[in-house]
Each structure stands twice: as C-alpha cells, then as structure tokens.
Amino acid sequence: MAENNCESCPMRAKYDAKPKSFVGRFRRWHIKFSPGWKAYIKSLDETKRMEVVEKYQLAKP
C-alpha cells in the first residue's frame, strides 16, 4: 500500500493556519469522504488518532 502524505499535506497546513479560509473550509469538507484521509486515520496508533480527532473535532472513527 502506498504511503499517503496527509501528515505533510499543504492543504492541511493551510487549514491549521486559517481554518475559516476557503482552502481550510474546502479541506474540512474534503476529508469527510477522502479515502486517503480515512486510510491515514486508520494507520495511526490509538493515541495519535485520538489527538487528530480532538484537534480537528472529528467524529471518532
């Protein structure tokens, strides 16, 4: 399986800097159905996954 780049994604960095910007809102919408994001979340250990879920206020996977 190929590595994903969600950890270093430029859109993620823009979301982190300005979540209410157009790019930030687009990224937030995009991760709801992105297979790459879902694979990234599943690849994380439980502790890191919970950190990401809390940081981005996501539904618990």
Image (cartoon, grey):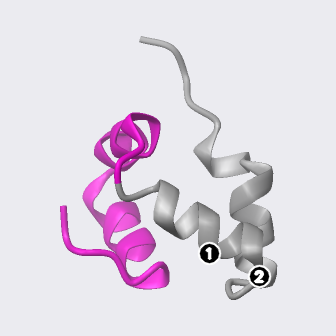
Residue type at mark 1: give it: Arg
**Residue found 69% across the figure and 88% down from its top:** 20
**Residue found 35% across the figure and 36% down from its top:** 39
Magenta-colored stretch includes residue 30: no
**Residue found 55% across the figure and 23% down from its top:** 3
Name the spot of residue 50 as percent of width and height, x first. Answer: 32, 72
Q: Which residues are magenta?
A: 33-61
Name the spot of residue 42 as percent of width and height, x first. Answer: 29, 43
7 to 17, vertically: above or below: above
Name the spot of residue 21 as percent of width and height, x first. Answer: 77, 82
In the rendered structure, the answer to whether residue 48 lies left or right of residue 50 reads: right
Per the image, the residue denoted by label 1 is 25
Mark 2 vs 1: CB contact within 8 A: yes
18 to 41, vertically: above or below: below
Per the image, the residue denoted by label 2 is 21
Quadrant for the N terminus, please: top left
Other-residue count near label 1 (Cα within 10 Å), few / some / many at <14 / 14–19 / ≥20: some
46 to 22, vertically: above or below: above
Residue type at mark 2: give it: Ser
Disc 1, SS? helix
Marks 2 and 1, Cα distance to the nearest angstrom? 6 Å
